[in-house]
Image (cartoon, rainbow, N blue to C red):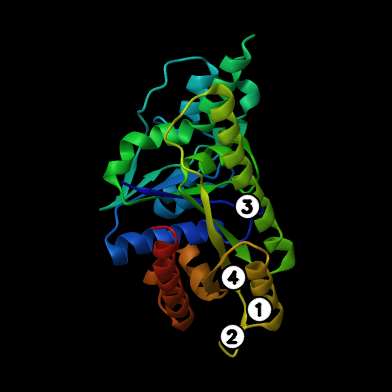
């Protein structure tokens, strides 16, 4: 049964997609895990482009082929029968992808059909939150991990990701402007957990939902001096630890290795050079910690 992990942040440019991509590759390559990656970033589709550069050409200008997550939400909006079919593409043996669809940007519970029955309206709202989980249920036995990359904002899509996830992590730069968003992420996870509890109680229903756990922030693009975090970044790292949330002990430094890997549409594990080798080892250490925190 797959462990589902959402990579969520309210701020862009913090390395969220880079972290999700490299952890997915490492789980598959170094730990022989069967991994499904869901690209729910409807603005950039960054992971889709890393695995399949041709998928990102014309992104946002052409309608994707095949059945995507957007179609699952659209079925609910049109009161159609909910089907489980979805387009899955193989990246390599044991590593699959549900590609990005820019139309996810239009997903909103405001589009749901409404009735005069309060109970029915609340059940429809619950179904909206459960869409991604609904799609994943028949797939979980095929994979060890499902990693979901999200668009950096609090949205109805993010709430659906949180509902579907056993754990969530929040990649972040170690500066105050970026890391302040971790509290927002933790708050939104708590909101989803509380909303489901309230709906269960109010409607006297039960389902398989287990409260989503925040496994921690993940430091990205960190700066070092003498192989140690710079003082300002160490201060932010320690502040995050004290703030009631968690932060992974492993972090990834900035440098040319990841930039070259991105330009080549490759993983940093496959790029030459001292900086790439350092970042590759950092991601391997992070993946080992990830497996402990998100078992």
Residue on which disc 4 sits: 221
Q: Earlier in the sequence, mark 3 or mark 4?
A: 3
Residue 139 at least partly seen: yes
Task: Measure the alpha-carbon separation of dots 3 and 4.
Answer: 21 Å
The reply to whether dot 2 and dot 3 touch (C-beta < 8 Å) is: no
For label 2, the SS is: strand
Estimate the x, y position of residue 196 in percent, counting from the top left: 56, 34
Image point 71% across, 60% down: which residue? 180
Q: Quadrant of residue 255?
A: bottom right
Q: Which residue is mark 2?
A: 228
Q: Residues within 10 Å of mark 3 (few under 14, many from 20)?
A: many
Single out the mark in the foreground, 3 or 1.
3
Q: Which residue is mark 3?
A: 186
Q: Pick out the residue farthest to the bottom.
A: 226
Q: CA distance from mark 4 to mark 2?
A: 13 Å
Q: Residue at x 29, y 53 (%)?
A: 34
Is there CB contact under 8 Å for labels 3 and 4? no
Q: Mark 1 or 2 closer to N-term?
A: 2
**Numbered disc 1: secondary structure:** helix
List x then y, in percent, for residue 127: 51, 26
Q: Are marks 1 and 2 in contact (CB under 8 Å)?
A: yes
Q: Of the residues under marks 3 and 1, which one precedes in the sequence?
A: 3
Please state which of the two labelled residues, at mark 2 or mark 3, is closer to the viewer.
3
- Say which label, 1 or 4, has the lower sequence index: 4
Q: Position of residue 200 (x, y in %)?
A: 54, 29
The nearer-to-camera label among 4 and 2 is 2
CA gap between label 1 and label 2 equals 8 Å
| Up-down relation of residue 172 to residue 186 (above or below) | below
Is 272 above or below relative to 75?
Answer: below
Using the rendered image of the protein, determine whether residue 268 is visible from the camera's viewpoint: no
């Amino acid at each position: 049964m797959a462990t589902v992990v959402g990579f969520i942040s309210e701020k862009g440019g913090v390395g969220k997609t880079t972290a999700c991509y490299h952890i997915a590759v490492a789980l598959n390559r170094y730990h022989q895990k069967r991994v499904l990656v869901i690209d729910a970033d409807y603005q950039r589709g960054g992971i889709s482009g890393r695995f399949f550069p041709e998928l990102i050409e014309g992104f946002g200008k052409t309608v994707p082929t095949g059945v995507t997550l957007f179609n699952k939400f659209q079925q609910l909006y049109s009161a159609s029968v909910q089907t489980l079919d979805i387009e899955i593409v193989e990246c390599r043996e044991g590593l699959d992808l549900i590609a990005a669809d820019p139309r996810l940007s239009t997903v909103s519970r405001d589009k749901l059909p409404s009735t005069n029955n309060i109970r029915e309206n609340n059940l429809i709202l619950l179904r909206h939150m459960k869409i991604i989980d609904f799609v994943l249920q028949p797939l979980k036995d095929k994979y060890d991990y499902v990693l979901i990359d999200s668009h950096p904002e609090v949205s109805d899509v993010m709430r659906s990701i949180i509902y579907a996830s056993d754990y969530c992590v929040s990649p972040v730069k170690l500066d105050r402007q970026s890391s302040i968003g971790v509290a927002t992420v933790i708050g939104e996870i708590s909101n989803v957990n509380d909303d489901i509890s309230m709906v269960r109680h109010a409607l006297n229903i039960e389902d398989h939902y287990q409260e989503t756990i925040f496994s921690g922030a993940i430091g990205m693009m960190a700066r070092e001096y003498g192989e140690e975090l710079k003082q300002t970044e160490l201060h932010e790292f320690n502040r995050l630890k004290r703030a009631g949330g968690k932060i992974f002990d492993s972090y990834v430094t900035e440098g040319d290795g990841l930039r070259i890997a991105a330009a080549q549409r490759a993983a940093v594990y496959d790029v030459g050079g001292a900086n790439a080798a350092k970042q590759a080892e950092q991601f391997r250490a992070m993946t080992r910690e990830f497996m402990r925190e998100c078992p």
